[in-house]
Image: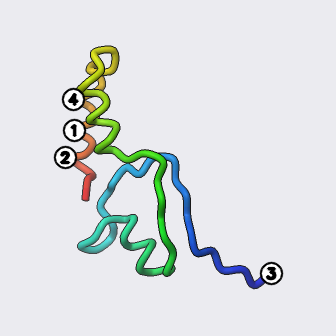
Amino acid sequence: MGANPNLMLVGLDRQEKGQGSVSARAELENIYGMRVISIINLDALIQFSEKDPEYSEYLSNLKAYRDSWGA
C-alpha cells in the first residue's frame, strides 16, 4: 500500500537496552525514522509503586528488572 508509519504508540515502555549502545526505543526511532510514544514507562511505574503501599510488594521485582534489562 506504500504507507510509511511515522509514529509508534506503546502501552508500557520497559526502557530496555537495545542491540547497541542506545535504548531499544532510540534504536527504533533512529532506524525507522519514527517517533515512539509510550503511555507509561518503567520509571513511572516504579515511582507509582514507591508511593502506593498497595503496590509496594512489586517494587523489588520492578527494580531488579530495570537493573538487568534497563538502558
| Vertical position of residue 47 compared to residue 15: above or below | above
Under tag 1, what secondary structure?
Answer: helix
State which quadrant residue 27 falls in: bottom left
Report the amino acid beneath label 3.
Answer: Met
The numbered mark, 4 or 2, whose residue comes first in the sequence reads 4
Which quadrant, please, contains the N terminus? bottom right
Please tell me whether mark 2 sits on a helix, a strand or a loop.
Answer: helix
User: What's the distance in space between the residues labelled 1 and 3, CA to CA?
Assistant: 43 Å
Name which of mark 3 and mark 4 comes first in the sequence: 3
Which percent across, then down, holds residue 64?
21, 38
Q: Label 3 crowding class (10 Å Cα cut-off): few <14, some 14-19, many 20+?
A: few
Q: Are marks 4 and 1 in contact (CB under 8 Å)?
A: yes
Q: Position of residue 51 (x, y in %)?
A: 25, 24
Residue, disc 4: 60
Q: Are marks 3 and 2 in contact (CB under 8 Å)?
A: no
Provide the secondary structure element on which disc 3 rests.
loop
Q: Residue at x 37, y 47 (%)?
A: 41
Residue 23: x and y, percent?
A: 31, 65
**Circle 2 residue:** 67
- For the residue marked with disc 4, what is the amino acid? Ser
- Precedes in sequence: disc 3 or disc 2: 3
Mark 3 lies on residue: 1
The residue that label 1 is drawn on is: 64
Compared to residue 35, the image places residue 67 above or below, namely: above
Image quarter hosting the C terminus: bottom left
Cα–Cα span, label 3 and label 4: 46 Å
**Tag 2 and tag 1, C-beta contact below 8 Å:** yes
Quadrant for residue 40, please give it.
Answer: top left
